[in-house]
Image: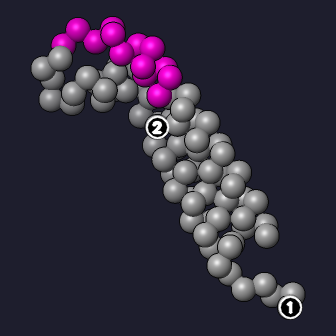
Amino acid sequence: MKKVIAGLNFLFCGTIIYITTLIIISANFNNITEWSNSLGAYWQTVVNLRLIFPYIISIVLLLSGIVFTIWGVFSKNDRS
């Protein structure tokens, strides 16, 4: 049960951070003047705003939340 709660907390925090970075990126998306760069407009905005670290942290939290939740759901209960 503890793994499920930890997994859901990681999943919730990762989702909040991911949505926050998406809102910040979309709010500043129109400040990009070059559309023909190698990264593309989305990733150029991420790089310009230095949001790589929060973006990676949110993905790691989302993935670890999914793993912990699945692990907690399918693990055997030691008390029985």
- Disc on res. 80: 1
Which residue is painted at 41% across and 13% down in the image?
28
Question: Label 2: how many residues lie within 10 Å, few (<14), some (14-19) or many (20+)?
Answer: some
Give the extent of the magenta segment.
Answer: 22-34
Secondary structure of residue under mark 2: helix
Indicate which disc, 1 or 2, sits on the residue closer to the N terminus: 2
x 72%, y 65%: residue: 4
Which amino acid lies under the numbered mark 2 shown in the image of this protein?
Tyr
Q: CA distance from mark 1 to mark 2?
A: 41 Å
Check the image and name the residue furthest to the front: 73
Q: Residue at x 45, y 14 (%)?
A: 27
In the image, residue 73 lies at what x, y percent?
A: 68, 73
What is the quadrant of residue 2 in the picture?
A: bottom right
Compared to 54, does 44 lie above or below?
A: above
Residue 40 in which image quadrant? top left
- Which quarter of the rendering shows the N terminus? bottom right
Residue 32 forms part of the magenta stretch: yes
The C terminus sits in image quarter: bottom right
Q: Residue 6, percent across and down?
A: 72, 59
- Horizontal side, residue 25 vs residue 39: left or right: right
Give the residue type that dot 1 points to.
Answer: Ser
Q: Which residue is mark 2?
A: 55
Pick the residue in front: 52 or 22: 22
Q: Position of residue 67 (x, y in %)?
A: 57, 65
Residue contact between numbered discs 1 and 2, judged by CB atoms under 8 Å = no
Instruction: Indicate how the structure is coloured in the image.
Output: one colour
Residue 9: x, y in percent?
Answer: 71, 51
**Is 70 inside the magenta-drawn segment?**
no
Residue at the right extreme of this rendering: 79
Q: Is residue 19 above or below residue 12?
A: above
The one nearer the camera, 74 or 67, is 74
How would you rate the neighbour count of disc 1 (Cα within 10 Å): few for under 14, some for 14-19, many for 20 or more?
few
